[in-house]
Image (cartoon, helix red, strand yellow):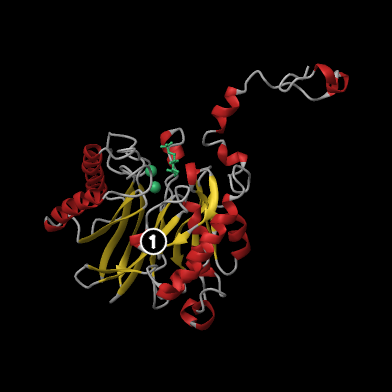
């Protein structure tokens, strides 16, 4: 039995141009450094890629989750890539490296992390999902469908190994609390929470006690870092990543991919302030364009090989089977864009409060006057806009 840890650590270290995509030199820098680390035995294997302006390090190692050695390696890679970004004059170089004092763990520093340790099965299919221009709650709907919706995952109905359901770890990212809910019995409570995706996010999914896999080893891990908390002010959406294990008592690869055939609405997009559809794309098309989007998701599949090698990736959304989802995402993009600055295309006030709204309200200070009581005594002829007395 081999204990293995899969980690995705991601960071926006500079966009090319603006916030659209990642310059290939940044990926090359990361590849060189991770190859050195792999040769030195610090990690077992890795894959470097991007979605939009986010540089993604997918690593396989034996150090466990939250390991200082692996996190400091990722931090060094991002620092080095930031230097390259500065040389190339890329936009927002080092934007997510919010603190330059590394203290053992990148959590809470800016980069996003999805990590899980597990006992590797003979053949271990694992998928990495990488999103740009959205927030961690964007994973709620597809993860729920994969592990709890029998209309999406046939195995929940057909395969006795999935019948007992799964255990969901949900984080309240405002109150910094978590709760565990089990499906199918807690499905409605779970949906009541995770439907509010800006606040309640699925952090991990576990097999239940009755499952043939160990109940303390996650089968899903999602990054939940909240940049707005880390930075104290808005510096961009979190652009989340997730790892999902598949097959043999878990949803099949095709059941893991199925929810992405529906380009559901997520928040983020232009200026982190708009709702729009998430478009599944191959890495070739993982560049944000229209209105800094639309938000994108890339899905890469690997098998973890006996010697702890990542065999892959297969670029799952680079496939005609997702053409309809892309077409629908384009139609929904047209429809949503026509709302311009109006909700529900623009995010509701509550979420705008975390972005630029407070500044706008401040600029209007002193221009507001009561519309109660005295309003009826107002002589309409003396009223000019912004001066009701
Ligand atoms: C969204 C995002 C972009 C920027 C936009 C303005 O997550 O990163 O949509 O918000 O391009 O960027 P600045 O303020 O850097 O000009
Ligand atoms: Mg950016
Ligand atoms: Mg980004």
Image position of 205 (left or right of 360): left
Image height of 73 relative to 349, above or below: below
Image position of 35 (left or right of 239): left
Image height of 288 relative to 214, above or below: above
Q: Please tell me in which quadrant of the rendered image residue 49 appears.
A: bottom left
Q: Position of residue 41 (x, y in %)?
A: 14, 57
Q: Position of residue 14 (x, y in %)?
A: 31, 42
Q: Is mark 1 within 8 Å of ligand 3?
A: no
State the residue position of label 1: 298
- SS class of the residue under badge 1? strand
Q: Which is more toward the observer, 23 or 238?
A: 23
Q: Please tell me in which quadrant of the rendered image residue 211 appears.
A: bottom left
Q: What quarter of the picture does the C terminus occupy?
A: top right
Q: Which is more toward the observer, 21 or 121?
A: 21
Image height of 332 relative to 86, above or below: below
Could you tell me which residue is drawn at 20 percent across and 54 percent down? 31
Q: Position of residue 91 (x, y in %)?
A: 33, 39
Q: Position of residue 213 (x, y in %)?
A: 39, 72
> Does residue 120 show up?
yes
Tell me which image quadrant ligand 1 sits in.
top left
């Amino acid at each position: 039995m081999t204990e293995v840890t899969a980690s995705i650590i991601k960071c926006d270290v500079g966009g090319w141009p603006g916030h659209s995509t990642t310059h290939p030199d940044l990926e090359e820098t990361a590849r060189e450094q991770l190859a050195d680390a792999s040769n030195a035995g610090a990690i077992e294997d890795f894959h470097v890629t991007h979605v939009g302006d986010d540089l993604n390090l997918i690593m396989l190692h034996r150090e466990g989750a939250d390991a200082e050695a692996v996190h400091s390696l990722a931090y060094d890679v991002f620092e080095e890539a930031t230097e390259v970004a500065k040389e190339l004059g890329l936009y927002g170089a080092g934007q997510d490296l919010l603190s330059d004092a590394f203290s053992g763990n990148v959590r809470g520093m800016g980069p996003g992390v999805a990590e899980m340790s597990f006992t590797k099965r003979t053949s271990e299919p694992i998928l990495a999902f990488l999103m740009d221009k959205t927030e961690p709650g964007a994973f709620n709907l597809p993860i729920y469908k994969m592990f709890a919706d029998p209309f999406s995952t046939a195995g929940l109905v057909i395969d006795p190994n999935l019948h007992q359901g799964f255990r969901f770890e949900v984080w309240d990212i405002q109150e910094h609390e978590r709760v565990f809910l089990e499906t199918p019995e807690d499905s409605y409570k779970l949906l009541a929470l995770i439907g509010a995706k800006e606040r309640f996010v699925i952090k991990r999914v576990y097999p239940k006690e009755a499952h043939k896999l160990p109940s303390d080893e996650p089968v899903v891990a999602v990054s939940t870092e909240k940049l707005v908390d880390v930075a104290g002010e808005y510096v961009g959406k979190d652009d989340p990543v997730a790892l999902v294990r598949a097959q043999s008592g878990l949803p099949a690869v095709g059941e893991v991919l199925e929810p992405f055939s529906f380009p559901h609405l997520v928040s983020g997009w232009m200026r982190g302030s708009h709702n729009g559809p998430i478009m599944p794309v191959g890495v070739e098309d993982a560049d944000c364009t229209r209105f800094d989007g639309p938000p994108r998701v890339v899905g890469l599949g690997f098998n973890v090989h006996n010697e702890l090698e990542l065999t892959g990736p297969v670029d799952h959304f680079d496939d005609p089977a997702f053409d309809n989802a892309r077409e629908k995402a384009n139609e929904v993009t047209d429809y949503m864009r026509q709302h311009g600055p109006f909700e529900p295309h623009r995010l509701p006030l509550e979420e705008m409060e975390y972005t630029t709204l407070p500044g706008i309200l401040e600029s209007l200070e002193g221009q507001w006057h009561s519309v109660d009581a005295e309003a009826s005594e107002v002589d309409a002829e003396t009223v000019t806009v912004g001066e009701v007395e």
